[in-house]
Image (spheres, coloured by chain):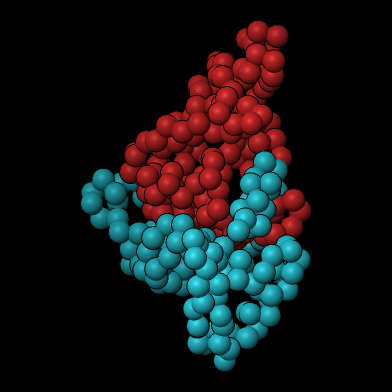
Chain colours: A cyan, B red
Amino acid sequence: MLIMIIMLISCVPRKVFLRGIDERLYAEVKARAAILGITVSEAVNRALELWLRTPASHAVEGGGRSRRLVEAAERLAEGRERGVLVVANDGELHALFEDLEGAVRWLRELYLRGELRNSLIRPLGRRAVRYLEVGGGVDELLGELRRG
Amino acid sequence: MSCSESYDAARRPPAPRVRAELENPVTGRRVSAALYLDTGFDGTVLLTSDLWEELELGLVELDEDVYALHGGYLPVRLTPALARVNVCGAWSGLARVYLHPLARRPLLGRGILNELYAYLAGPEARLLLSRSPASTAW
C-alpha cells in the first residue's frame, strides 16, 4: 500500500493524502509522467479531470456497458466467427445478425416498444485491438497535460 | 452533392470545419455539430463527451478495443458506437464513431474524408466538400 500526496492545481495548491494507492499503478504513472516531462501530481490531476469528464454512464458500473452485458457477450460469442451479436438488458435478450444494420433494426424495435434498457453490439470474429492515430488533437492534448 | 463552409475564424490559425448531422440509429435522437477536418485522424468521427451524452450513444456501443494514438504514442482508450452521419449532404451512412474522453472538439477523419473530394480554399477561408470532382468549383 502506498500513501500518496497530491498537489491539487488550483488557485492555491493543496496537499491531499490518499491511502491504498496500488504500488504497481503508481510506478507506471511515475514512469509515464517522466516520459511526458510532467510531475506525478500533474499526471494525477489530469487523470482526475479525465475521470470527471467521462460520461456518467461509463464512470459507474451498471451504466451503458455493464459488466453483465460484457460477460453475456463474451459467453455468447464463444465459438462464433461470423456476423454480429447483440446483447440487451443485462444479457436477458440476445440475437445474431448478418450485419450492423440488422442489429440496429432489432434494437430500434425494442426501443420503440419501451423494452430496451441497455445493449452491447459485438462484431464476431477474431478480436483485435485497433489503434487510431489522431493528428490534430496532439498539440491540444499535450498542451492540456503540460498545463499547470 | 456538395457544400461549402467557412473556416472557424475564432481559431488561430483559422480551421476548416463542416456541419454534420449525427443521429442515434436506435432512439432517433439527432444533433447537429461542426466537425473539424483532421486528415491525420485514421477514423471516421471523433466525438466529445457532451455530444456523446446528448446523442445517448451508450445504447449503441460496440464491444471493440480501440485506442487513440497521439503523435504515435500516448494511447487513450476510445469508446466506439454506431451513429448515422450526414456530412453536409455530401456523405451519409451508418458509421463507427468514437468517444474520446479528452477531446474538446469533434473531428472528421480520413475514414470518411477519403470518400470525398475536399478543396481547401485557404486564402478565402472556405472549405468545399463534394462526392464528385465535377460538381465543385475548382
Quarter of the image with the N terminus of chain A is bottom right
Residue B20 in picture, x, y percent from top left: 49, 29
Q: Is residue B42 visible?
A: no
Q: Nearer the viewer, residue A75 or B129?
A: B129
Above or below, B58 against B114 in this view is below
User: What residue is drawn where x is 73% and y is 62%?
Assistant: A36
Q: Nearer the viewer, residue A107 or A9?
A: A9
Q: Nearer the viewer, residue B3 or A82?
A: B3
Residue A120 in picture, x, y percent from top left: 44, 59
Residue sticking out furthest to the bottom: A1
User: What residue is drawn where x is 50% and y is 62%?
Assistant: A10
User: What residue is drawn where x is 35% and y is 59%?
Assistant: A118
Q: Is residue B125 visible?
A: yes
Quarter of the image with the C terminus of chain A is bottom right
Above or below, B37 against A80 in this view is above
**From the viewer's perspective, is A103 left or right of A39?**
left
Residue A107 in picture, x, y percent from top left: 36, 50
**From the viewer's perspective, is B112 left or right of A72?**
right
**From the viewer's perspective, is B61 left or right of A4?**
left
The number of callouts visible is 0
User: What residue is drawn where x is 67% and y is 69%?
Assistant: A39
Residue sticking out furthest to the front: A12
Above or below, A58 against B43 in this view is below
Residue B8 in picture, x, y percent from top left: 56, 26
Q: Quadrant of residue A56?
A: bottom left
